[in-house]
Image (cartoon, helix red, strand yellow):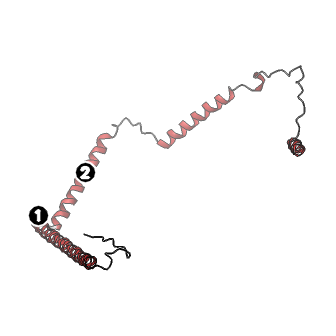
Amino acid sequence: MTFFVCVSPRSPFATSPAALQALKRKKRYEKQLAQIDGTLSTIEFQREALENANTNTEVLKNMGFAAKAMKSAHENMDIDKVDDLMQDITEQQELAQEISDAISKPVGFGEEFDEDELLAELDELEQEELDKNLLEIGGPENVPLPNVPSTSLPSRPAKKDEDEDDMEDLQRWAEAM
């Protein structure tokens, strides 16, 4: 809380004891305000430190609970057993893939085609079709051309050069002065 005392040096109250008392009181209040502000800052800092300490304690407790839970979950597990199990799963998946591949093969009609040969034959057919289409395109003899006009074009008056126009404007301006 700040108090302002307006005392002009020309005022009759400038040297009075009441003015001096008011100024002393003002200084005391300012000092008290600074002390209270410092105390509040210290209390707030302590409160934040306690909150952080409580948070750290809770985190540490929860980490301990998690470690115990993981230890009890892994008590009955052995890494060798896990490796054996994963190897068994891999073997069974490979077997299932082999069975699936065997089932999906066409049954022996003896018609197995080489994919490279099929692609080459497809390319040949596409090239033949392209060649045929190119031969069917009509040449320039089929395109009618326009006739040359027999009338002459209208003549236009010659354009003045832009510099000449600027010079004429400059001359008119100079004459007007």
Query: What percent of the width, then of the height, locates residue 145?
Result: 79, 23
Task: Give the quadrant of the N terminus.
Answer: bottom left
Residue 38 screen position, x and y as percent? 23, 76
Ranked by sequence position, the earlier of labels 1 and 2 is 1
At label 1, counting other C-alpha atoms closer than 10 Å, the crowd grade (few under 14, some 14-19, many 20 or more) is few
Of circles 1 and 2, which is in front? Answer: 1
Q: Secondary structure at mark 2?
A: helix
Helix, strand, or loop for circle 1? helix
Q: Nearer the viewer, residue 69 or 20?
A: 20
79 vs 140: above or below: below
Left or right: residue 107 compared with residue 72: right
Indicate the quadrant where residue 105 lies. top left
Residue, far front: 12
Q: Tell me whether circle 1 and circle 2 mark residues in contact (CB < 8 Å).
A: no
Residue 95 has which mark? 2
Q: Look at label 1 and name its amino acid.
A: Ala
Figure check: 50 above or below 156: below
Q: Nearer the viewer, residue 105 or 143?
A: 143
Q: Residue at x 88, y 35 (%)?
A: 159
- Residue 8: where, in percent of width, then height? 37, 73
How packed mark 2 is, by other alpha carbons closer than 10 Å (few <14, some 14-19, many 20 or more), is: few
Which mark is drawn over residue 73?
1
